[in-house]
Amino acid sequence: MSVLARLSGVPAATIKHYLREGLLPPPARKTGRNMAFYDPSLVDRIRKIKRLQREHFLPLRVIKELLEGNQPENLDNVAAAAITRALQDASPASTLSEPQLLEMGVRSSDLRLLEQLGAIDSSGEYSPDDVRLLRTLGAARKAGLTEDMLPPEILQEYLAALRALVRTELALFRRGVVPKAGDALPDLTRAATHLSEELVLTLRRKLLLPTLRELIQESLEKSGPT
């Protein structure tokens, strides 16, 4: 188990949980209470399970059905599978290692910081979205936005706000689209996944200036007449 954990980059406790949930087959041979032999192919399967959890927030029961090639049983699971495929189409599942990131110019301190904040996972495998986050942070520093101006801790506020937004989006989707989509649910889910990203970017851009004016007005009202 320790070797399997080291090769996959996933903790042994997590792998044991996958075994209990039926996502992994039992050991090929068990020679004692604390010794067993596992198929080497499990390394890639464990990495894939972890990636689906980390990047797409899928429950283990859905991941199990996806790995087994089965059609998910209920509408929520069908939507989850379609969202997974849409996200994979938009962002390939290939990952980079830390040495590869460092060769690309990513600072080790930035990597540790984003891991500490929970913005990226500390598994040792970094997705294209992880790379974009790191590059964005590096670009901000090069542009002169120092840590004194915009401390990295603001990412925690961003994450909290975005989680609330995503929960709202999914609640609306489950209530409005999933029950009425029928056989078109996979296609509608993929379309909604892509369109929601464009909608959020556009609305954010439109709201920036009006919201800034509101903040200035609120500040003036609080300060009172001079």
Image (cartoon, rainbow, N blue to C red):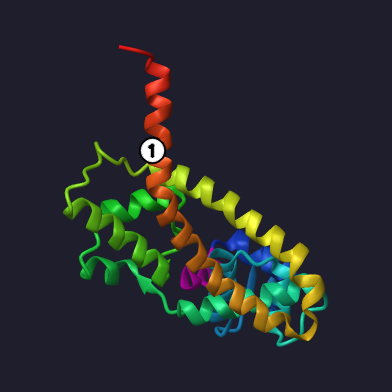
Residue at point 45%, 55% (across, down): 204
Q: Quadrant of residue 174?
A: bottom right
- Of 15 and 34, the residue lying toward us: 15
* Residue 164, percent from left and from top: 59, 49
Report the quarter where the C terminus lies.
Answer: top left
Q: Is residue 7 magenta?
A: yes
Q: Which residues are magenta?
A: 1-10
Depicted 222 relative to depicted 176: above or below: above
Residue named by callout 1: 213
Residue at point 29%, 55% (across, down): 137
- Of 47 and 150, the residue lying toward us: 150
Report the quarter where the N terminus lies.
Answer: bottom right
- Of 42 and 194, the residue lying toward us: 194
Q: Is residue 210 magenta?
A: no
Task: Count the numbered circles shown.
Answer: 1
Q: Which type of secondary structure does the marked residue at label 1 adopt?
A: helix
Q: Is residue 74 left or right of residue 140?
A: right
* Residue 13, percent from left and from top: 62, 59
Depicted 159 relative to depicted 56: above or below: above
Residue at point 50%, 72% (across, down): 8
Q: Is residue 226 left or right of residue 197?
A: left
Q: Quadrant of residue 21?
A: bottom right
Residue at point 55%, 67% (across, down): 196
Q: Residue pushed farthest front? A: 225
Amino acid type assigned to the residue bearing label 1 in the image: Arg
